[in-house]
């Protein structure tokens, strides 16, 4: 643009200067021609008068042509006698006439040497010429200025290039007062060549100055514009790179438009900076809030790409990438394409949907209640509510119900079977009847134990804190349990060996509940033991925690079973447990009592070597 303007400006200046110079030259030329024409008209008239006088003199054989200034006055007086002269020259011979003309030209040339004088007869035949011998010149009839006079004009001028002399001349022809002769005077146009050169020189100088001035002013203007442009670009680059404090220079010495622009630009940036800061503060607050959520939250766009994920979502789904910088497919986060379908549904229907999903999180599967809500036409927000605990509890409950039903059904079926048998057999031996009744009794007792254990378990599970707490000696409670189990242990020749230390361990807890723990562990140790053996019992306090350790050298079990023995209805050896009257709930009750007392229950066992159960209680 700048280059174009510069070129265009220079061309215009050159054109204007050229046109003005040409017009000037033309004006000068026409002025010159007009003044030459007047001059030549005077010259021809003067020459003609001189010729008249000489002809009169020739008639009186006294050839004379005055060439002095004084004679000029005389000649003027004599012009009044012109009519008389014309009638007199008719008497001259052609030869004398030509001689008189030559003499007149010669005398005239002395006066004005730069003129060319030509005298022609009425047909254009040259009678004499100041620059060339007359007989050497052809008929001049064809010359426009001569032909005009021949055709009737009194006088005629013409500027043209002379074929004879190869120069440009202004010719002026006029009819003479003698014999219709034609007198022509011509002046050289050299002076105009000089004037042309002068005008060209002036044109070049003025044009040059104009060009220099124009380019100088243009450079100055462009310099300010370039500075303004550079400042704008620099400021914009800074703003683009995040520096919102960048401003344009408000230069009062530059053009008013640029100053106004910089002022407005800076004001706009200031407003923008302020709005941006407020927006950032709002965003920071929102980010803090969303990131403090202990539930994963992500925003998914129409292309099913995650465009925002809160801190917890990134941690839980183990994805470090910032989706605001690098959006990634939603399915990569959840590994569940049904969630993509659900998002699509929300985009179509515009309504919130909720559904449960088991999703892979760091190293495991968690259950989530996923809620997808539309944010705008292009985004949905997905909130993952972790319901793993409730989900597990629900699963446990339903499997518990199934197990309980099964466990209850077995003794009931057995009881009903024997009752039916007794009812249908009339002649059953009394010993057999007793035997059947014995079995019914055993099954009924098992049912009772089962129901008691279930009630006990649900009772513990309902509680957050235990009730009916009392102060008692744990060593004394252990002794009570050992006395209670003495017969059972003696039957299998098993020694119950409590540790000597401590002899007194005061605790505050629900006595029955703690007794339940001791009895369950000790009964199991006796039950799952072959004949002859030892059971060691150890009680310890460490700070606010009491540890009960029951070690036996009984059947033991493998590591796999060790992980599951505290589950409800889990039995290592089902038939043995049944045969021994087990319900499969004893250790589960122990674990839940430990949890009730902010403690834990664990086991270490080696098959055929024995087991060590450890229960920690905060009592
Ligand atoms: P049960 O009523 O069947 O005894 P428990 O919950 O008390 O149920 O025990 C679960 C299972 O753990 C038992 O069936 C048994 O197989 C195993 N078990 C418990 N204690 C011992 C032990 N001291 N030695 C070996 N196995 C044991």
Image (cartoon, rainbow, N blue to C red):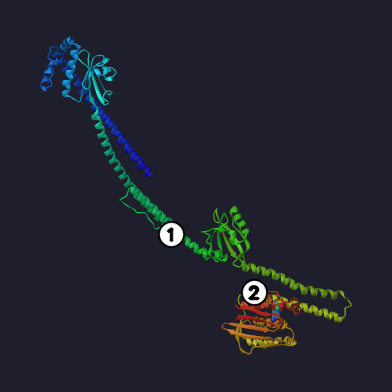
Task: Tell me the quarter of the image containing the C terminus.
Answer: bottom right
Residue 179 x, y percent position in the rendering: 21, 12
Residue 183 visible in the displayed image: no
Mark 1: which secondary structure?
helix
- The answer for how far apart the CA atoms under marks 2 and 1 are is 53 Å
Residue 419 x, y percent position in the rendering: 82, 75
User: Which quarter of the picture shows residue 328?
Assistant: bottom right
Mark with earlier residue (2, 1): 1
Residue 604 drawn above or below residue 9: below
Residue depicted at x 72% and y 69%:
402
Tally of marks: 2
Instruction: Name the residue nearer the viewer: 296 or 231.
Output: 231
Which numbered disc covers residue 460?
A: none
Instruction: Name the residue nearer the viewer: 528 or 348.
Output: 528
Which numbered disc covers residue 461?
A: 2
User: Which quarter of the picture shows residue 154?
Assistant: top left
Which dot, 2 or 1, sits closer to the camera?
1
247 relative to 338 in the view: left or right: left
Residue 84 visible in the displayed image: yes
Where on the image, by quarter, is ligand 1?
bottom right
157 relative to 552 in the view: left or right: left
Mark 2: which secondary structure?
helix
Residue 106 drawn above or below residue 201: above
Residue 240 drawn above or below residue 214: below
Residue 87 x, y percent position in the rendering: 17, 10
Label 2: how many Cα within 10 Å (few below 14, some 14–19, many 20+): some
Task: Tell me the quarter of the image containing the N terminus.
Answer: top left
Instruction: Name the residue nearer the viewer: 177 or 406.
Output: 177
What residue is pinned by disc 1? Answer: 277
């Amino acid at each position: 643009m700048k280059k174009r303007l510069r070129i265009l400006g220079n061309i215009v200046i050159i054109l204007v200067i050229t046109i003005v110079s040409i017009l000037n030259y033309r004006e000068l030329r026409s002025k010159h021609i007009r003044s030459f024409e007047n001059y030549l008209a005077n010259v021809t008239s003067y020459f003609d008068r001189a010729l008249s006088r000489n002809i009169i003199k020739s008639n009186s054989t006294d050839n004379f042509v005055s060439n002095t200034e004084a004679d000029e006055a005389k000649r003027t007086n004599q012009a009044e006698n012109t009519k008389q002269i014309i009638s007199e020259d008719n008497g001259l011979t052609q030869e004398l006439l030509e001689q008189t003309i030559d003499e007149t030209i010669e005398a005239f040339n002395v006066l004005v040497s730069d003129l060319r004088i030509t005298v022609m007869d009425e047909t254009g035949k040259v009678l004499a010429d100041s620059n060339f011998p007359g007989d050497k010149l052809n008929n001049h009839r064809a010359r426009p200025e001569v032909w005009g006079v021949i055709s009737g004009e009194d006088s005629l001028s013409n500027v043209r290039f002379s074929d004879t002399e190869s120069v440009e001349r202004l010719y002026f022809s006029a009819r003479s007062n003698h014999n219709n002769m034609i007198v022509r005077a011509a002046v050289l146009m050299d002076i105009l060549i000089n004037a042309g050169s002068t005008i060209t020189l002036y044109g070049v100088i003025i044009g040059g100055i104009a060009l220099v001035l124009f380019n100088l002013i243009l450079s100055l203007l462009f310099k300010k514009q370039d500075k303004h442009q550079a400042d704008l670009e620099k400021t914009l680059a800074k703003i683009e790179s995040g520096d919102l404090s960048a401003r344009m220079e408000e230069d009062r010495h530059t053009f008013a438009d640029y100053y106004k622009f910089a002022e407005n630009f800076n004001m706009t940036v200031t407003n923008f900076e302020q709005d941006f800061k407020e927006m950032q503060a709002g965003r920071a607050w929102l980010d803090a809030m969303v990131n403090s959520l202990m539930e994963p939250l992500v925003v998914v766009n129409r292309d099913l790409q995650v465009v925002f994920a809160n801190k917890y979502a990134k941690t839980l789904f183990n994805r470090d990438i910032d989706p605001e910088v690098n959006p990634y497919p939603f399915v990569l986060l959840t590994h569940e394409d049904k969630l993509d379908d659900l998002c699509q549904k929300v985009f179509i229907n515009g309504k919130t949907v909720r559904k449960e999903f088991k999703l892979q999180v760091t190293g495991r599967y968690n259950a989530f209640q996923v809620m997808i809500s539309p944010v705008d036409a292009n985004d949905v927000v997905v909130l993952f509510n972790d319901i793993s605990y409730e989900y597990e509890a629900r699963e446990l409950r339903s499997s518990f119900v199934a197990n309980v039903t099964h466990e209850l059904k077995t003794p009931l079926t057995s009881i009903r079977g024997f009752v039916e048998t007794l009812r249908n057999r009339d002649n059953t031996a009394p010993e057999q009847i007793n035997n059947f009744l014995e079995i019914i009794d055993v099954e009924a007792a098992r049912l009772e134990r089962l129901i008691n254990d279930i009630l006990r378990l649900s009772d513990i599970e309902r509680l957050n804190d235990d009730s009916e707490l009392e102060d008692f000696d744990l060593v004394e409670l252990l002794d009570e349990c050992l006395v209670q189990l003495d017969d059972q242990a003696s039957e299998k020749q098993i020694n119950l060996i409590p540790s000597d230390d401590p002899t007194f361990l005061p605790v505050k807890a629900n006595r029955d509940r703690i007794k339940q723990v001791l009895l369950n562990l000790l009964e199991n140790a006796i039950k799952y033991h072959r004949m002859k053996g030892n059971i060691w019992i150890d009680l310890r306090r460490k700070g606010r925690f009491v540890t009960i350790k029951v070690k036996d050298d009984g059947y033991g079990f493998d590591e796999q079973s060790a992980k599951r023995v505290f589950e409800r209805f889990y039995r290592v050896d089902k038939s043995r447990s049944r045969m021994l009257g087990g319900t499969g709930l004893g250790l589960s009750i122990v674990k839940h009592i430990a949890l009730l007392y902010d403690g834990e229950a664990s086991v270490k066992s080696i098959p055929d070597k024995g087991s060590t159960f450890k229960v920690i209680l905060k009592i």
